[in-house]
Structure formats: structure tokens, C-alpha cells
Amino acid sequence: MGVEDLQIIMAESLKSALKEISENKDATIIANGTDMMPRIRDEGLKVEKILDISALDKELSYINVDSNLIRIGAMTTVSEIGSSNVFNGSLNAFYEVVSKFGGPQIRNRATIGGNICSATSSEDFIPLLMALDASVVLQSVNGKRTLKLNNFVIGKRSVNRRNDEIMVEVQFSKPGDDYLSGFEKIGRRNILIINLINMAIVMSLKQRRVNDVRIALNRVSGKVPGRARLTEGFLNGKEIDGNIISSAREKLAEELKLSSDFRASADYRIHLAQAILEKLLNRFREGV
Amino acid sequence: MSVSVESYITDLQKKAERGELLYIGKSLKRIDDLEKVLGSPIYTNDLIPRNTLYAKLVLSKYPHAWIRSLNVSAAASHPGVHLILTYMDVPGINESAAIVPDRPLFAHEKVRSTGDIIAAVVAEKEIRAMEARELVKVEYDPIKPVFDPIEAMGADAPKIHEGGNVAKHIRVAKGNIEAGFNDADIIVENTYRTQFQDAVSMETETAFAIPRDGRILIMGSMQSPHNTQASVAKVLGWPLENVEVIQAVTGGAFGPKSDETPGDVASIAALGALKTGKPVLMSMSRRESMIAHTKRHPSIIKHRTGVKSDGTLTASKVEIYLNGGAYASLGVLVIVRATFHANGPYEIPNVLNDGYKVYTNDTYAGSFRGFGAPQAIFAAESQMDEIARKLNMDPLDLRLMNMLRPGKRTSTGQLMDDSCGLPECVDAVVKSSDYRKKASEYSNQGGKLRRGIGIALLHHGNALGPEGNDYAYVHLSVDKKGRVHLGTGLTEYGTGAISGLAQIASSVLGVPVEYFVIDRPDTDRHKESGPTVASRVTAIGGNASRNAALKLRDRAIAVASKLLECPLSKVKIVDGYAFSEDNPEKMVSWDEIAREAHDASVDLNVIGYYMAPRCSWDDSTGLGSPYNQYTFGAAIAEVEVDIDTGLFKILNYHVAFDVGRAINPKNVIGQIYGGSVQGIGYGIMEELVHINGQVINPNLKDYYIPTSMDIPDKMTPIIVEKQGAMGIYGAKVIAEPPVVLPAPAIRNAILNATGGSVNDLPVTSEKVYKALKH
Ligand SMILES: Cc1cc2nc3c(=O)[nH]c(=O)nc-3n(C[C@H](O)[C@H](O)[C@H](O)COP(=O)(O)OP(=O)(O)OC[C@H]3O[C@@H](n4cnc5c(N)ncnc54)[C@H](O)[C@@H]3O)c2cc1C
């Protein structure tokens, strides 16, 4: 089965998209296709019916701040996130994700909704949004529901989406001014990589004391993204110094259960995660 | 004409040296620059008419197996499918092999790698062919495979071909190796390993065949149309003349398109076209190409070097095992070049090199830019740094002490004449990089980020040498408008070399390059000129182009002398105008000369020919002078390594090549940049990974080549010119050597920064990290 045999349904609006998906539950949703198209072309992914929601950018491309709640529409592109000033200050990590994301062409097309729904360990927004304890909003003809991101992304390429739902938004509370955020990823070249490991940290730091730290990685166990709870528990309430950082590195190694592949061995991936942890904590400590 | 050709050539040579030839040594614009930038060239896949059929390959699932049964009936009855081609459909010889007849076009009875072609499906749409190929039923009886070349040489290793698993052995032997080791104060032994590299030309292998009244026309992407013609004729069982091959605009090649794959795609397209009576396109997907075409050989290279405590090299024993994959390909020549260059550019009195190209059940390896030199020089130059460390000597000093200079001899015993510009290259990069200062600065560093500086040198035998007869033809034909059509069996595939041939002819004729039109190479029209490989177009083809232009010039001068009413010997042609020396005011333009020639029935169609002097190589003694001349090069890389993670940056890269004479300096620099980037890829990230004979990353998502973000911020190419004996105006080859130096230079810089030796390519951050934490 290939592109020529596809049945393609073009949705003109969110309303029509919801109707179509309720009537075509077997359809595969495609937003801007940067993840889907290579899978169909190169990985032989078999799809027969597509619901193309790319025209929904009219309705679902937004970054809104409602008092303390930041809401990002599913069709918002990576470039749009990069050029918004909403993320200045405590949410600076968003710009770090953007600047290391694909190349310019990909950034202009890749959507945050597609990024979350792809649900692989190469998706960079997932750890950052997990560190922010974000929720996704799913909508069907029957209404909306909100789900914590860690209950939504449940495995590699596996999300908790009912087959008549479209993800319309991701939202999280804006952290206070005493919060810091950081993101780092490492691959085998400088851009256009499938990362070996990435990590996002969000935490509050007052007089060197760590509070409410949230650390998320693209891989915590196997290839599934998640939070490094043990390390978080260790760091909370501590004053960061060199010793604490090295102990945190040890804790992180204890809780990561990674696997090797042709790109890197498990122990090197763990070592890189430790190095990123140290780098980000040092950066926070030095206030840069 | 009163002037003899010889004296005219000497005169040209002198003028070239004095920089007086109008078009030589000038960075002229390439003839195809603009169309390349506009994306307007017509590549093979742009030529396809509507009724074309598409062919897709069925590749082997096993690396080594008997084919128990092959059933194509379900696939053949799939909608849109016209034909399934298998070994049974080959009317001629079922073979697609360059030198050793060991590779069938379609697997028969046995498969030896996962790149083996079992069948090709020909259908109305590509998608139908792709669906149908899933329906081709093949039953296999797996045979025990072998993937390690040294293991494959063992007595009880699985037999891949009749006649053993060593496809080629070659030996270089000089002096007395045992005496050399006895003379040594220390002996240094190391084993180096290199990986499969894919060429990743932007366009994959592709061919388009049209049946034509008992003949067949093939247009495709390739380096050597006459080789493709011979492959197709063999498969069809036809005389050569009935197969016409035109090289379409070719989107990169790098060597694999001179090996066996262009023959595969052309033969399959031709078979399909003849059986169906319709045009057939056989165009490999990236995946098919990365699995089924030839790559750079992985290698295991063992070095044992004897050295005196003052740094004098006394003996070098090298064993090279190239993992050839399942077939010989041009790899039987690759091992020759690798073995000749295995000790690096040094004079060593006692040498014993054994090179083996070995069959395994990996996909096959073959011709690729550098042709064995990247593996050989990586090992040799890494070994030099290991020796320097043992002696506590600066790696540069060790090299200065032992390297080739005029009067020194290579490992095969070849005497270096005045054209050996290695000292000048070393000097240039040492100055440009401020090596001495940096080496002392970096010898004492603390902290997490450490800098290092590394050096690597090379010599590179020019053109084919013992790989074949080194000749070329160039056709020049002037039409009545004065346009000079240049045709040759040599091909352009991205380097600008054919523009260089026009530049050379234009310098002889005195007619600007703007008058030149380059014809598409066509076996019906152009004489076979040997393969377009070994960086030989400018050096060898340049001589043929000059010879053609000399003939044409005689005829044009005769016409001009009539128009100018002056003696032949007085006619000069400069920048498109002819005049008499005695009366430079009166001029006739090249356009007028062309028109007059046309009207007066003067034939302005000529063919120039050149064959390089034979080289000497004696297999029985392991000695000789295998190449007419050498290119030399030196590189210095500077890196910064994070010793916590092994992650590193290449800060800058200085590289100098002795190119004899830069016919077009801009193009030379272009080759240095491009080759260096491909060499950086080879050095630090590229690797086509085989696991149990299966290629696991045959796509550009998982196979990394460098991006603009991965190359050094600063690259400094330097041209050194010490004229060689053979090449046109003293030119030496440059297309391949640049790919060789980055890997050892970077590896040595990392060693300098961290004290960690990475002896297998690519030098990834993980390997650097592991070399640090033992
Ligand atoms: C060259 C290249 C480089 C890349 N680099 C990076 C990188 O650096 N970092 C990174 O994180 N990713 C990277 N990606 C991956 C990809 O670009 C992202 O995952 C992107 O955000 C996906 O968005 P999209 O709109 O293209 O999604 P699509 O491809 O259209 O869809 C992706 C998946 O999400 C589902 N989906 C999309 N939208 C919705 C929705 N609203 N509701 C329900 N399901 C939905 C689709 O069904 C599909 O399964 C790269 C991709 C390429 C090709």
C-alpha cells in the first residue's frame, strides 16, 4: 500500500475534522506530516485512510496566557514557539528546544501536537512538557477531556487517544519567577539528529536551595520518556553544591534503565544523562 | 606550420609556468555553474515519458543461503505488473562484474549477501512494482555465514565462492624486514579498524532504457558509459554496437558509479525494455542503493614498526585485511593501492606489506573516492603518532625526520624527484596553524575542556598506475557559428573536471571558454576513454584535450592565414581573435574563421589522444614505480574535547596539497573543501552498520553525514605547486586525496588533547570517552 492508494480526507475546520474522525475512526490523523511522511515513505508504514488536519492551523495555532495557565494550540509550529516572547524567563527552555530542533524547514512545519502524539524518544517537547507537568486537551464530537501528559504518552508510539479524538491543546501552569528551566540534547552530530539522550529540568531555586524540581528525559526505562523521580526526590530541599551534584549523578544512574543500540551503548547514554544533569544544575547554580 | 608540435608543447609548458597562458591557473567559472544552481539540468529521472514502466528490486533476505525455490507467479499476476525478471530471463551471460566474474546480475542457486538481487519487478507504476515484490516467493536454505575477513581466511571458514575467500593478495617487499626489526630500539604494534562508508551521492543509481529497432538506448547516472555499455551487451548477449549508452547529468558519484551497480540498473532496465517493448526506468531508492551498491571497504590493519630511539624508522610490517563483502568488484584494485600506500609517505628501508581483499557475507565493497588510501593512511598516520608517544617525541618532528623528499624512496622503491612537494605542504600547514606554539601550549592543560592539535600526511599515486591503461580521447568539433563542441568518454559528475578540459583546449586554441559546449558522453559518438576514476580527468584527459586542440589549432591557423593573407608561422590567436604578428591591427574573429572553414570545406573536427607512460610494478619482487607521479598533502586539525563526555569540536582544519599545477584554482579548492568534509564524515560519524549481514541504517535518518553545523568553523585550504612529469602542464590529481587526511588528523588531535587512542573509525564521542576511562 502506498501514497497513491490513500483515501485522504481534508478537514476544513475543527468542527468538520471532529465529525470526520467520528465517522472514520480508522483514519490516521496527519498534521503537517514531518513525522508521518518519512514513516510512510521509508519505513513502509501502511496507512489506508488519512484525515489531514493541516488546515486547522487557523483555529489551533495559538499561544495563550490565561492568568497563570499557558495554553498552546496543537497546530502551533516549532518556529512559532521560537518567535513568541511568552517563554522568556522561567520558561527559557522552550527556546533551547527550538534552537536544537531539526533544521529550519522542519521547525517551520513541525507542530507541537504532532510532536507529542508521535510519542517516541526522539520527540524533544515531551520531556520539557513532562517537567512542566503539562496536560493535553483531547476533543471529540462528544466534548473535551483533559489528561496529564504522563498518562497520555504511555509507551513508544503509544498514546492514550480514543480513535474519535483530536488533540487540540497542551496546557500547563506558568512556573513562578523563582523557577528556572533548562533543556539539553546530545546526538552524533550537531543538527538533524535522533538524540542519544535529552533532558529537561524545571525547578525553583531560592538561596541555592532546590525546590519542586522536575527532571524528565526522553528515555527513563527502555525507550519510554518519563520523570527521574528518584533524582528529583534526592535533590528537593538540598542546597546545590559540587557534592550534591555528584550524588545526584549517582542517583540518576541508579534509576535509568536504558538499552544499547547501534547509535550508543546504554552505559554511555547514562553517562551523557549524568553530564547533562551536572551541566544544567551548574548553570542554574551560577545563574546563567 | 614551421613550428613542430613538440616545440609548441614545450613552449606552452613554459608559458604555463610563467603564468602567461590566458586560461590556465585561472578560477574560471565552470561551464555548468549556472544551470546547477538553477536546478535546471535534465537528470535521468526528468527524461521519463508517459508510457514508461518502472522496475523495483527484490533483494535477498539472507546473507548466505541456497535458493531452494523461486516462485514469481503471484507477483506476476498482480495488477499493473508486466514482467518479473530473474536469472532465467537473461539471454546473454548472467553476470554483472567488473574484473573477476564472480557476481551474477540475478542470484542463481545461491545468495552471498543481502545486497544480492533475486529479481526485478517491472510494472506500470512504481507503487505496483513495490507491492508486487512482496509477492515474490523465495525459499532459502541458510548456510553458515562469515563476516570477519580474518575469520573468513581460516581453513574451515564457510566458502563463499569456489576457490577460497581471498579475492586478491598483494605484497610489497623492500629490504630485509627481520634485519630492520633487529636494527630497531623499540617495536610498536597496533591494530586499526575502519568501517563501511557510503558515498551518499545526491542522486542514486538510475538508468532508463528505450528499445529502438534492434538496438537499445540507455541513459543513466554513471561514471563510465563504455563500461556500462559492455555490461549491458554481455547480459543481452549482443554486440557492443547495438547498445548505446548516454551518460545523463549525474548527481554525484564518488566511485560507486564506476563500479558494478550502474551496470546492474542499466542491464535490468534494458532487459525490461526489450521484453516489453516499452521504456523502462530502473531507479534505486536510497535504501536499495545503500544496500546493493558498493561502499568503502571496512578494514583491519595491523602495524608492526621498528624505530630507533632517535626516531629513525627501520622497519614497517603491515597486514591489511579488506572486508570485501560478497564480491570482488573493483576492490581487487583497491587493495593494491591500499597496500602501496600502507606505510604512509615515509622512507623506510625495510618494508613488508601484505594486502588481502577478502570475501565475506556482508554487502560488497568497491570503488570509492580514495580507493584504499583512506584506510591505509588512517592506520599509517595513527601509527606514527603512537610511535611518537612511545618515544616522547613531537609527532611533527618524527615525520620531518622520515618523510619523503626529493631523493628519497617510497616503500615500493620508487625514487622521489623534484616534484615531491611534501616538505612544502608540511611547512605550509605548520605555519598556517601555528603548530609549534599550540603544541607547546596544549602539552600542559587542566580542566574539563582540553584542546589538541594533530597532523597527518599523505602521498597519493596519480591516476591508474598499475590499475589499467591510462589513456583518453577528446573530440573537438567546431560548428559554423564557432562553437567548439567538446566530447569525450570521460564524464562530468560534479567536479567541474570536463570544464577543465575545455579550459585546457581553450588555452591552446586562444579561444575563450565561452565558445565551448560540452556534449553528453555517448558511446555512439565518443571513443572509449577508460573509466572516469582515479581523479584522472584533468591530468590524463587534459593531455588528450591539449592534443586535440593542437590539431584543431593547425587547421584554424591555416584558415586564418588565408583570411589575413599572411604566412602560417605569423598567425597568432588570442582571446578569440587571429592576427598576424606583423600586423596586429588587422584581426579576424574566431566566428569568421569558423564560418570560412565551413564554407571552404575545411574540416574542424578532430580527436586528440593521450596514453600515459607505462608504470613499472613487479609482482614477483614486490617492488617498482607503480605511478608516474604523486600528489602530496599535509593536514593539521585542532580539536576541543570535553573529557567528561568525550564530545568534541573540530576548531579548525588546515590542509595543503601539492597539486603540481592548479589548472583552475577555484575548482581545486572546491575539491579540497568537499573532500575534506566527506573525510570528516568518515572520520567522526559515517558508518553503514551491518549486523549479521543485514544493513541496519540504509537511510539518511540513521546514516549520518556531516551538515554545515558539523564542519570546523575555519578551514584553510592551501595550494602548493611542484609540477609533475605526466599531468597536463604539470598538474597532479586532487579529487581523491582530500578525503584521506581528516580522519587521522582529527584522531591524532584527540590523542594529543586527551592521551586517549581511538584506533577504530569513526571516532565517535563514545569511543573517545571510553579511550579515556580504561
Ligand atoms: C528531518 C527531521 C528532523 C526532526 N528533528 C526533530 C527534532 O529535533 N526534535 C523533535 O522533537 N522532533 C524532530 N522531528 C520529528 C517531527 O518533526 C516532530 O515530531 C513534529 O513535531 C511532528 O509534527 P507534525 O505536525 O509534522 O506531525 P505529523 O507527522 O503530522 O503527525 C505525527 C503524529 O502525531 C499524530 N497527530 C498529529 N497531530 C495530531 C493531533 N492534533 N491530534 C491527534 N494526533 C495527532 C499523527 O497521527 C502522527 O501519529 C524531526 C523530523 C524530521 C523529518
Image (tube, coloured by chain):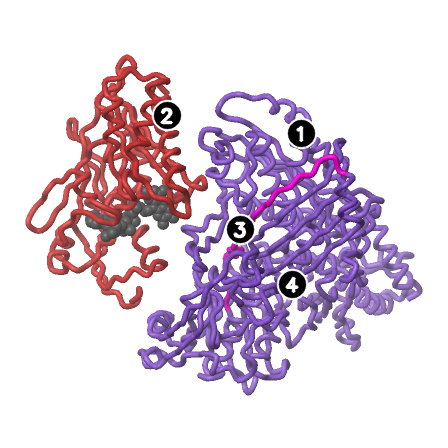
Chain colours: A red, B purple
Examine the rendered structure and indicate whether residue B573 appears above or below residue A242: below
Q: Nearer the viewer, mark 4 or mark 2?
A: 4
CB of mark 2 near ligand 1 (< 8 Å): no
Q: What is the crowding at mark 3: few (fewer than 14 residues within 10 Å), some, or many (at least 20)? A: many
Q: Badge 2 sits on which subunit?
A: A
Q: Residue at x 55, y 47 (%)?
A: B682
Q: Is residue B693 left or right of residue B732?
A: left
Q: What is the residue that sits farthest to the left in this orientation?
A: A142
- Chain letter of disc 3? B
Instruction: Say which of marks 4 and 3 sits in front.
Output: 4
Up the image or down, B475 lies above or below A143; here it is below
B161 lies left or right of B693: right
Residue at the image point whose x is 39% and y is 33% from the top? A271
Question: Residues at marks 2 and 3, common chain?
Answer: no
Q: In the structure shown, which secondary structural element does the residue marked by tag 3 occupy?
A: loop
Quadrant of the image containing the C terminus of chain A: top left
> Is residue B76 visible to the viewer in this orientation of the structure?
yes
For disc 4, the neighbor class at 10 Å (few under 14, some 14 to 19, many from 20) is some
Mark 1 or mark 3, whichever is nearer to me: 3
Give me the disc on residue B168: 4
Query: What residue is disc 3 on?
Result: B195
Q: Name the amino acid, label 4.
A: Lys
Same-chain status of marks 4 and 3: yes
Asked if ligand 1 lies within 8 A of label 4, the reply is no
Q: Which residue occupies 45% across, 60% down?
A: B693
The residue tagged 2 is A278
